[in-house]
Amino acid sequence: MSSKQTLPSAGPDRVLPAQHDQHRQLRLAVRALALPAFFVIGFTLCYGSAWQAPAPHGVPVAVAGPAAQTAPLRAGLARAVGPAFVVRAVPTPATAAREVRDQDLYGAYVPAAQPGATATVIVATASGNAVTSAVESLFRAVAARQGAQLAVRDVRPLPAGDTSGISLFIFLIVCTVGGLITVTSTGIAAPALRPRYRWPLFLAAVVAIPTVAYLLAGQGLGAISGPAGAVFALLGVAALFVLIVTMIARGLQLILGTIGTLFAGLAVFVLLNFPSSGASVQGPMLPTFWHVLNRFWIGASASDAFRSIVYFGGQGVGTDVLKLLGWLAVGVVLLGLGWFKVQRGHQEVTSDERSAAQPRIDSARAD
C-alpha cells in the first residue's frame, strides 16, 4: 500500500456553483453601476446647465426720482437691457430703499443731482451675491455714461460671518440630505420596522437635523445670526422642510423600494432641488428651465423662506410656507400610495398562503 494519500479532486460539481455565483455577483455589480452613472451624468448636466453662465432674466430694478425727470433715462435703459431687467420708476430714494428691503426690487439707481456728482445704487447683498453683482454692474455702466461716480448703499448686508452668502445654502443641503439619508438608512437597516417605531425616529430627526445644523453653523461658526424670534422661525420652517423630505422619501421607498428610492431621491432632492433653489445662484439669474422650477420647487420654497426670515424680517415668508404646505400634501399622497401598495402586497401573500394550505387541508380530510 502506498504511503501517499490521494486528495479528493474538485470536480465540476464543486467548481461550477462558485463560478456561477461569481458571474451572478458580477451581473449585479454591473447593474449597480447604473446609480453612479445616473449621478455623474445627471449632476454634470443639471448643475452645469444651471450654474455655468448665470445671467439676469427679468430682474426688477428701478430708477428713483420724479417720473418726468427720470423718464428719458428709464426709457433708454429699458431699450438697452431688453428682457434681462425690468426697469420701473419709484418716486424717491426712500421708497426705493424700502422696496429693496422688502424684496420687491433687487436694486435701484439714484441719478447724480448734477453733472460730476455721485450717483447711488441701492442693493441688498442678502438677496444674493450673483444678482447683486449684476445690478451693480448695470448701474455702474449707467453712471459711467453720465460721467458720475457710483456709491453703493447696501440696505440688507450679509452678516460678517458669511460674506460669501453661502451659509443658508449649506443649511438647506444639510436639511435635505439629512432627511433623505435618515429614510434610506433606516429602510436598509430595518426594513421590517413597524411605523409606530419608525416614525418616532423620523420625527426626532426632523427636529434634530436643523437644530444641530444651526448650532454648528450659527452659534459655532457665526454664519447664521438673528434675533431669537427669527432663529425659532427658521428652525420651525426648516423642521417643516425636513418633514416634507422625510415623507416624500418614505413614500417613494414604499412605492419603489430601496434602489428605486436612491434614483428618485437623487433626482428630486439633489439633481433638481439644489440647482433650482436660488440659494447659490438666485432665481432671476438662472436659465429659463431652472428659473421656472425656482418658482415652485421644494428647495426653492425652503431657501426663499430661510432668506426671508434671516435677512428680511420675514417679508414674504407666508407665500413660501404655503408652497411648502403644498409639498407636504404631496408627501401625504405618496405615503398613502405606499401604504396602499404595502397592504395589497400583504393581502396577496395571505391569499397565496391560503391557496397553498388548502390542498394540505383537503388531503388531511381525505385521510
Image: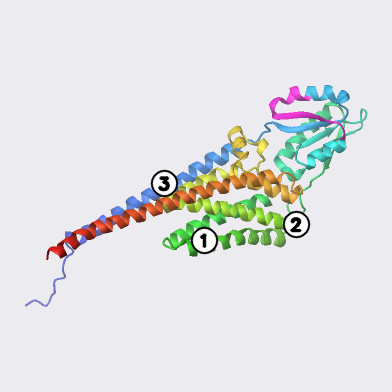
Alpha carbon of mark 3 to alpha carbon of mark 1: how far? 31 Å
Taking the spot 15% from the left edge, 64% from the top edge, the residue there is 365
Residue segment shown in magenta = 77-92
Quick one: SS at disc 1? helix
Label 2: few (<14), some (14–19) or many (≥20) C-alpha neighbours in 10 Å: few
Residue 272 x %, y %: 55, 42
Q: Quadrant of the C terminus?
A: bottom left
Q: The disc labelled 3 sits on which kind of residue? A: Ala
**Mark 2 or mark 3, whichever is nearer to me:** 2
Taking the spot 60% from the left edge, 35% from the top edge, the residue there is 292
| Among the two numbered marks 1 and 2 on one chain, the one whose residue lies closer to the N terminus | 1
Let me know if residue 72 is in the magenta part: no
Q: Quadrant of the N terminus?
A: bottom left
30 versus 217 height, above or below = above
Q: Is residue 337 left or right of residue 19?
A: right
Q: The disc labelled 2 sits on which kind of residue? A: Gly
Res. 92 image quadrant: top right
Specify the label residue 359 is tagged with. Answer: none
Q: Which residue occupies the extreme front position in the image?
A: 365
Alpha carbon of mark 2 to alpha carbon of mark 3: how far? 46 Å
Q: Which residue occupies the extreme left position in the image?
A: 1
Specify the label residue 229 is tagged with. Answer: 2
Quick one: SS at disc 3? helix
Residue 307 visible in the snapshot: yes
Label 1: few (<14), some (14–19) or many (≥20) C-alpha neighbours in 10 Å: some
Residue that badge 1 annotates: 199
Residue 192 x %, y %: 41, 62
**Looking at the image, do the residues carrying marks 2 and 3 touch, with CB atoms under 8 Å apart?**
no
| Among the two numbered marks 2 and 3 on one chain, the one whose residue lies closer to the N terminus | 3
Q: How is the image coloured?
A: rainbow
Specify the label residue 34 is tagged with. Answer: 3
